[in-house]
Amino acid sequence: MKLFSKIYNWCVSPRCLFILTVIVLTIPNMALDFTEMMSLPGKVANVVFPVSAVWLAMTFGRRPGIMAWVMFPLMFFAAFQIVLLYLFGRSVISVDMFLNLVTTNADEAIELLDNLVPAIVTVVAIYIPVLVLGICSIIRKEELDTAFIRRQRKAAAVAVMAGAVCLAVAYSVDKDYRMENDMYPVNVCYNLVLAVDRAKATSDYEKTSAGFSFGARSVHDPGSAEIYVLVVGETARAMNFGIYGYDRDTTPLLSAASGLTVFTDVITQSNTTHKSVPMLLSAASAEDYDRIYREKSIITAFREAGFHTVFLSNQRPNHSFIDIFGMEADEWKFIKDGPKAESNPSDSRLVELMADVLEKGYRKLFVVLHTYGSHFNYRERYPSGSAVFRPDGATEAVAANRQELLNAYDNTIRCTDKLLSDIMAMIGGSGVISAMLYTSDHGENIFDDSRNLFLHASPVPSYYDMHVPFLIWTSESYRRVYPKAVNALAANCRRNVASNSVVFHTMLSMGGISTVCRNDSLSVADNCYVSQKRHYLNDHNRPEAIDRIGLDEEDVRMFRLRGMAFP
């Protein structure tokens, strides 16, 4: 009984709270040493320097309860970091992760949180008791004795100096080592500052783009009727499309369509919606991303050239460039927005709204459709009666459910197949010169290999969320009037393509829109198209060649297995 009493008294003592606070803040550093690719000195420095700094900081006050709560921001970051490691398996809290917090709607967040219960329970069990003990210590006005503080301060100071030596060694042996990139939580704080700066740059867009004009004009016959449609998919990966050789017939309608050109070697430049979609809608790309803050979107280019422009989205506004660019259109609608909006409308609703637009008889029409496509939770993306692949009821994101999750995902691809077929039939049936381009913002991981990756948006992308479908359909009248463009599509369909860098130029080229911003060497509808070395837009908005972004051997194998260009 006395032993139990001693243990209890120690556990609720101010010394225990002091030590416990330091220990729980060490957990992310230890975990990241196992998940990140760093030199040995870098890994040692990643633990010794920041942990000793926290240890030293804890000695700045004699009341450990107050100091524990002073450390609350670090505990929040630590909890966030653990959850992300559970979800993605690697990488620190990135700039995009911070931005995702403010650009993800409540419905998406709830769907994701439902599958993070183990991670959330873990961080609650680790950090809440420390904070509760801190409150109790504050209430009891507990203080550490001066001798303890002095001993800890001396030991922590020695540890800080040892950490500084490790840091110096890390810089000397690794020319790419940077504290702001490689040391937790310095990197997290740095990324938070960048996220704030980026959010401000977005909010200042109206000022920084004021007065911008494409100077666009149409070089096509002014008397001809034309319809061009850009369909932006969501979370669709090419490998699950039957038309790309998938062993399931997920695209029966597209496979039978005439006038369809299938591009086989296409990767996205970002696996995050809030960056990929704006690049698809503008001249910005991984190679020149900052122009997004100065220039308007492709919608404005068509509008300047005399087209009536329409933007229809099956996603909620998310305070990103998607909203800004969409609202440049003559007509725009987010069908999930508003007090009477359906909570989970089908993408087919976009086709109905587009039909209403076509009935108005615009001579020149440009339409952008932003779908919800194959976004998790997959089972919610289609009516139960339309399911082809069963069983598809499992929604919990665990590897054991992979087959049912895959069945549900493939059912969403079937819905996309019908959606695109309906659009082609609608505009093709009008008899006017028309074309449609479809691609997805990014793909998806569905527990495809031993890494057990799920979803997308990891700071280190994979083959599964990079390889995207890219389809261009032209009407019979377009093929007759503009055979040169159609022949160029056929000639370029097996060349390597970075989707975000070519959509803007390809749509302008096909639509006959002339502007100084158009670059025909980036248009797959032009014989001038030149395959570029492909880049991925990293978390700090800098382009990285795809062979430099830390792809796993499995990803490299998959690229080569699919016959895709990879260094």
Image (spheres, rainbow, N blue to C red):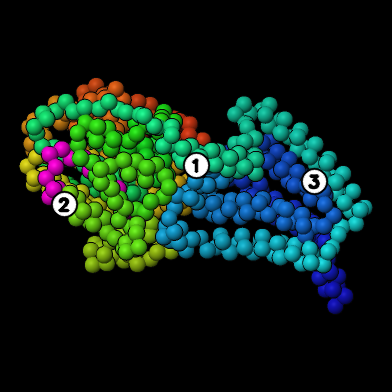
The percent position of residue 112, horizontal first and vertical second, equals 45, 58
Residue at image point 34% right, 34% down: 296
The image quarter containing residue 232 is top left
Cβ–Cβ under 8 Å for marks 3 and 2: no
- For label 3, the SS is helix
Query: Please, is residue 184 above or below residue 146 in the view?
Result: above
Marking on residue 388 = none
Magenta-colored stretch includes residue 371: yes
Give the Cα distance between marks 2 and 1: 36 Å
Residue at image point 19% right, 36% down: 307
Query: Please, is residue 63 above or below residue 188 in the view?
Result: below
Q: Which residue is mark 3?
A: 56
Q: Amino acid at mark 3?
A: Leu
Q: Which residue is mark 1?
A: 199
Residue at image point 54% right, 42% down: 196
Q: Which residue is mark 2?
A: 355
Q: Nearer the viewer, mark 3 or mark 2?
A: 2
The percent position of residue 194, horizontal first and vertical second, equals 55, 38
The image quarter containing residue 349 is bottom left
- For label 1, the SS is helix
Cβ–Cβ under 8 Å for marks 2 and 1: no
Q: Amino acid at mark 1?
A: Ala
Query: Please, is residue 88 above or below residue 435 in the view?
Result: below
Q: Which residues are magenta?
A: 358-375
The percent position of residue 430, horizontal first and vertical second, equals 8, 45
